[in-house]
Image (cartoon, rainbow, N blue to C red):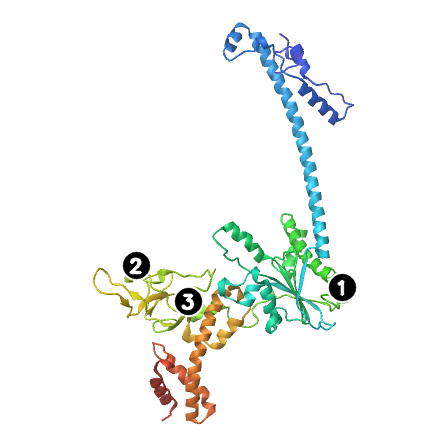
Amino acid sequence: MLSHAESGEHYSSVTWSSYGKEYIKIDPDKPLDQLEREAFDQALATKYTGEPDNTPSDETALVAGMASKETIEHHRTALQAQAKHLQVLGRFLERKRHELSSILSEKQSQIERISKVIDIIELYLGVHEEVVQFQEGPSADPSEPITLRQQILYMDEEVGNIESGGWDFRNIEDFDNWLADDDHYKKMAPEEKCVVVFKPRRYGKNYGEDPFFNAAVNEENKRSYFLIRNGTNLYRICTNLSVYERLFPSEDEMTKLSEHVREDFFRRDEAEDKMQKYARNALMLQGLIERTTIFAPVPEGLNIMQPDTYGSAIRFIRDDEAALPDGSLRYRDWKKKLNAEIGVGSRILFAGFFHGEGYAGRHSYSNFNYDRFNFRPPCMPDKGVYQVKRIDEERRSDEPAFVCHFNPKDTVYPRGYWGSSGERKKAIPFCLYRGDAFVLNYDSISLEDVEYYIESRIEREDYLDILPTLRTLRKMRLKELKHERGLIARLVLELGDRKRRGEVEAAVEWWKTKNKWKRPIAKDDAKAIRMIRKKLGIK
């Protein structure tokens, strides 16, 4: 038996003659690719060469091993050689796979870069642009700057139509008409030459039970539209451009994005991507300036991408960064403050459990006590003003329930077999809560506050909660005030002094709210007039 050095094998006693042909001689003058190819060809050409007659089967392997150790060693060596050939083949294929993957990755990167360039060119040229002019008239004065408004608005919130859960992408042409009617466009685009981005809806709408269909259709509600005003000319433009959070970055955002690009390695790609999105918005507008007459006339050489060309021709309105313009409370805080004063005897505005299709607020038969109605829920109470009869502290753990009464005038069926059915005669209880979107403390609200929050565009995000409640309240309040104005005018006439009108109004309010059980004037005109006249000193 040969030594390890003589055999050339460190882990075996196989002879060189039986193993030598499996090595590949390397020519140092040949390129690596050629050597790999030769190794690959040799691995493919080399096959297992054991004699067929002597190939051990499952049944004879042990017998052959016991008869001839040399035969088993021969087969083992041949299998090892074949395994090495397969290893050579595998390494070659793995190397080629990496090479092809690298080539594919590079080509994909090139394709992505080329696609971005094509998208930019198409965006500038308006290839996928749809321009609709839905109002025509005189253009703005040439001295008027192009005003870019930062905030993204939402069509359904601007209109405030609560029917069927609000407008959606199917109402785009209706929105054109709404903007043109009664100069509604001046609220969205108040400047003479103005650009505003809007989308059909902030929140999705329910189009059925299929979640995939819902998601697909709601993509249309996320599409970005540009409303452009030039004097009284109005344009609606739709492209394949998606405007995300705002038309141009806030001051704080721009500072942070620049810092990430310079210093934050981990967020650099994210920051650069966001800056590119803002740049695409500017490029689209620049294309409109240069290839259309929508903004005409504009100064020569004006370029949104280059601030040194602005002069007085471009103005930025950072309305997405502004806080409330006055000291008024946000609607939620105002409502919370009002409803905190609700107690026994208070009058509550109930605007109805349902605000239309798609309304996501609380509505439930749990507002009723099933035990009292044979587990059959009654008709829902109508919208209106109800008085709190008592407070139930145990019905819910998070907040007390205000128990009010109403009579639905439905048919009552007797329990068991005795008695006859008939119209309900006694009022039945139902519960309301401070946190309900459709509940307000009626006697603590001024009509001025109601009008303020109805018209407030800052609060429009929650218009499906706010507008149904406030519009119902305004309607009822105006009806009640109409009756009160007649009484006030009569009392002022009796006093013979118009300057005392404020005193009369205060006396009327005193009569309505002085007792624990609040009441309208119309509930008891004779008694109200008698007590108010006494307070005013009228005999």
Lower sequence index among marks 3 and 2 = 3
Residue plotted at (37% across, 88% down): 535
Say which amino acid is labelled 3.
Answer: Gly
SS state under label 2: loop
Say which amino acid is labelled 1.
Answer: Leu
Lower sequence index among marks 1 and 2 = 1
Q: Residue under label 3, please give it.
A: 352
SS state under label 3: loop
Of circles 1 and 2, the one toward us is 2
Residue 332, horizontal then vertical, whole percent? 48, 66
SS state under label 1: loop
> Which quadrant of the structure image shows residue 252?
bottom right
Quarter placement of the N terminus = top right
Position of 84 relative to 250 (above/below): above
User: Would residue 402 be seen by someone viewing this image from the given angle?
Assistant: yes
**CB of mark 1 within 8 Å of CB of mark 2?**
no
Residue 305, horizontal then vertical, whole percent? 73, 59
Q: Residue under label 1, please give it.
A: 302
Nearest to the observer: residue 482 or residue 2: 482
